[in-house]
Amino acid sequence: MSDAHNEEHQSAIRTPKQLIVAIAAGFLVPIICIVLLVQYVTSDKKVGAGSEGQTPEAIATRIKPVADAGFTFKDANAPKQLLSGEEVFKSTCVACHGAGIAGAPKVGDAGAWGPRLAEGYDKVVGYALHGLRTMPAKGGNPDLDDTEVARAVVYMANQSGGKFKEPEVSAPAAVAATAASEPAAK
């Protein structure tokens, strides 16, 4: 009976060589599995945060000044460049005069502009410069030069059936405009 009992409890490892192989396999098999798993996970090209972050284009985009995105710098000491009547209209006047908001005569509506044009150039320009009812002075843009406002009035009036003449540039503005248009001699 003792032989039968001993046979049931015998292990598969019977020699010291088998013991060494079993211990080595116990350590090496999990390590090999981990290495293969890491290789499998990292073998695909992953697209994600930082994968293309070190390319020269990505670096240039990150360090580019924010102010370069659609902004125009103006030199405060440079002579003022006067805008045309159409440019002033598009930047300042179109908000009200484009749609006829708050009683503003809509550009192109000869019926609405007729009584105003009958008052004369100086009167209409005076309204634009100093404001009238709900319209603020200079259309709410205090940075506009008086000549620019007059150009905008002429543009809107002429689009609406008027025959106003483009205003002459005042002396300081004329000097600044000619100085800016001439290339600097070196």
Image (cartoon, helix red, strand yellow):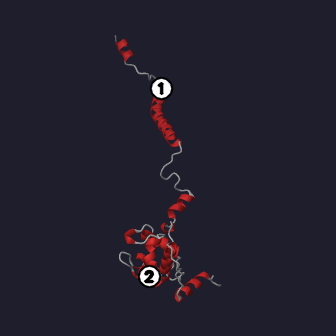
Q: Nearer the viewer, residue 147 or 18?
A: 147
Mark 2 residue element = loop
- Residue 71 lies, in percent from the top left, at 50, 69
- Check residue 127 in the rendering and tell me which mark sits there, or answer none: none
Query: Quadrant location of the N terminus?
Result: top left
Sequence-earlier tag: 1 or 2: 1
Q: Is residue 118 left or right of residue 1?
A: right
| Residue at the limit of the structure toward the bottom, as seen here | 171
Query: Which image quadrant is residue 126 in?
Result: bottom left
- As shown in the figure, which amino acid type bears the numbered disc 1? Gln
Query: Quadrant location of the C terminus?
Result: bottom right
What residue sits right under mark 2 in the picture? Answer: 119
Q: In this view, does 106 lie above or below 127?
A: above
Is residue 73 visible to the viewer in this orientation of the structure? no
- Residue 53 lies, in percent from the top left, at 51, 55
Q: In this view, does 149 lie above or below 33?
A: below
Q: Nearer the viewer, residue 41 or 123?
A: 123
What residue sits right under mark 1 in the picture? Answer: 18
Is residue 65 visible to the viewer in this orientation of the structure? yes
Q: Residues within 10 Å of mark 1 (few under 14, many from 20)?
A: few
Q: Which residue is located at x 39 percent, y 15 percent? A: 7
- Residue 121 lies, in percent from the top left, at 48, 82
Q: In this view, does 142 lie to the left or right of 59?
A: left
Q: Which of marks 1 and 2 is in front?
A: 2
- Residue 168 lies, in percent from the top left, at 54, 85
Q: Which residue is located at x 51 percent, y 74 percent? A: 161
Q: Nearer the viewer, residue 55 or 30?
A: 55
Query: Which image quadrant is residue 165 in?
Result: bottom right
Mark 1 residue element = helix
Whole-angstrom CA distance, mark 1 to mark 2, is 115 Å
Q: In this view, does 67 lie to the left or right of 183?
A: left
